[in-house]
Image (tube, rainbow, N blue to C red):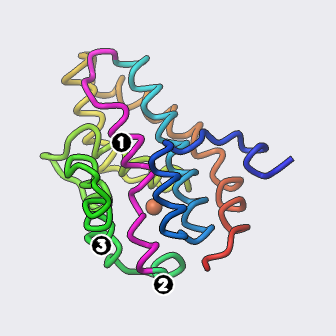
Amino acid sequence: MSDDDELRLCPLPDEVSLLLAELAAPPRLVAHLRLVHDVAVRLVDWSAEHCPGLEFNRAAVLFGAATHDIGKALHRAELSGPGSAHEPAGRELLLAAGVAPELARFAAGHATWGPDSGVEDLLVSLADKVWKNRRVPDLEDLLVAALVRAGGGERWEQFLALDELLTAIGDGAEERLAHQALFPTA
Ligand SMILES: [Fe+2]
């Protein structure tokens, strides 16, 4: 049984798998994108069930999660070290591959968020944090606010519901980190 089978990761969207193969993307990058995409699936499934009034494009979130770090195929040092050159480079790479700007934007914007961020953008950014159990209160607060606007209820109720989900996802972080570390950066 492979490690992927053990983690039961959702497969990446087909067009993303093809693109990563064409780029000869490093195995570590592919593993990371699969892990963050898998967490994004949990976030969108939960959001749709918990808050049916929350409007967002599920396919866009999943595409964004699956491609957010694709610029690291070009800036490989950023797979194991700091740096943000991969962000604009990832967007450009996707645009050059014919991806629409509204789907390419996640590669450039996943590391920043604010009151004007769309729900899709918040979910991609959140998936890229909580996969390793990194909790980011200001990011989570923006999603809580969107849940309150769309679904009503008290802010503390939405906060607790989201916190319960993120805690459950975070419980798998060690296993995900160990899995990712199995894959070489080049
Ligand atoms: Fe990432």
View extreme (left): residue: 116
Q: Residue beneath label 3, please?
A: 89
Q: Pointer 2: residues within 10 angstroms few (<14), some, or many (20+)?
A: some
| Crowd tier of the residue under label 1, counting other residues whose Cα lies within 10 Å: few below 14, some 14–19, many 20 or above | many
Q: Which mark is residue 123?
A: 1
Mark 3 or mark 2, whichever is nearer to me: 3
Label 3 beta carbon within 8 A of ligand 1? no
The residue labelled by disc 2 is: 77
Q: Are marks 1 and 3 in contact (CB under 8 Å)?
A: no
Question: Where the C terminus falls, by quadrant?
Answer: bottom right
Label 2, secondary structure: give it: helix
Gap in angstroms between the C-alphas marked 1 and 3:
21 Å
Q: CA distance from mark 3 to mark 2?
A: 13 Å
Q: Is residue 101 above or below residue 43?
A: below
Q: CA distance from mark 2 to mark 1?
A: 26 Å
Q: What amino acid is at disc 3?
A: Ala
Mark 3: few/some/many CA within 10 Å (<14, 14-19, 20+):
many
- Magenta span contains residue 57: yes
Label 1 is placed on what type of residue? Leu
At x 59% / y 41%, what residue is drawn? 11
